[in-house]
Image (cartoon, rainbow, N blue to C red):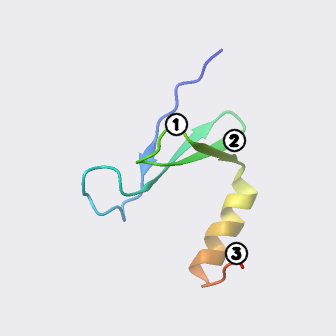
Amino acid sequence: MSHALHWQKSTFSDGGEGNTCVELAAAPDTLRLRESDAPTTQLTTSIAPLTHLIRGIKAGRSTAR
């Protein structure tokens, strides 16, 4: 069964042409992220890793080296 995703943009998006933000959608047992200018490329994750990433970003930490 196919599940239609409801994509949400951040309230911090700059309101440009609609292609300047990351979008998030909830799917059964997962979360999906995509960049609005490349909507066919999606990252699938779950709540715990995404929460960890967001908390790290807010704290000014980066795991990328």
Q: Which residue, given by chain and number where applicable, does mark 3 sit on?
A: 64
* Element class at badge 1: loop
| Disc with the residue nearer the chain's start (3 vs 2) | 2
Looking at the image, which residue is at 36% across and 60% down? 11
Q: Is residue 54 above or below residue 26?
A: below
Q: Name the spot of residue 6 as percent of width and height, x first.
A: 47, 35
Do residues under tags 1 and 3 come within 8 Å of each other at their CB atoms?
Answer: no
Q: Which residue, given by chain and number where applicable, does mark 1 sit on?
A: 40
Q: Name the spot of residue 45 as percent of width and height, x first.
A: 70, 49
Q: Amino acid at mark 1?
A: Thr
* Element class at badge 3: loop
Q: Quadrant of residue 15?
A: bottom left
Given the current orientation, which residue lies at the most extreme bottom position?
Answer: 60
Please rate how many residues cluster around mark 2, counting C-alpha atoms within 10 Å: few if below 14, some from 14 to 19, many from 20: few
Given the current orientation, which residue lies at the most extreme left position?
Answer: 16
| Disc with the residue nearer the chain's start (2 vs 1) | 2
Q: Amino acid at mark 2?
A: Thr
Q: Amino acid at mark 3?
A: Ala
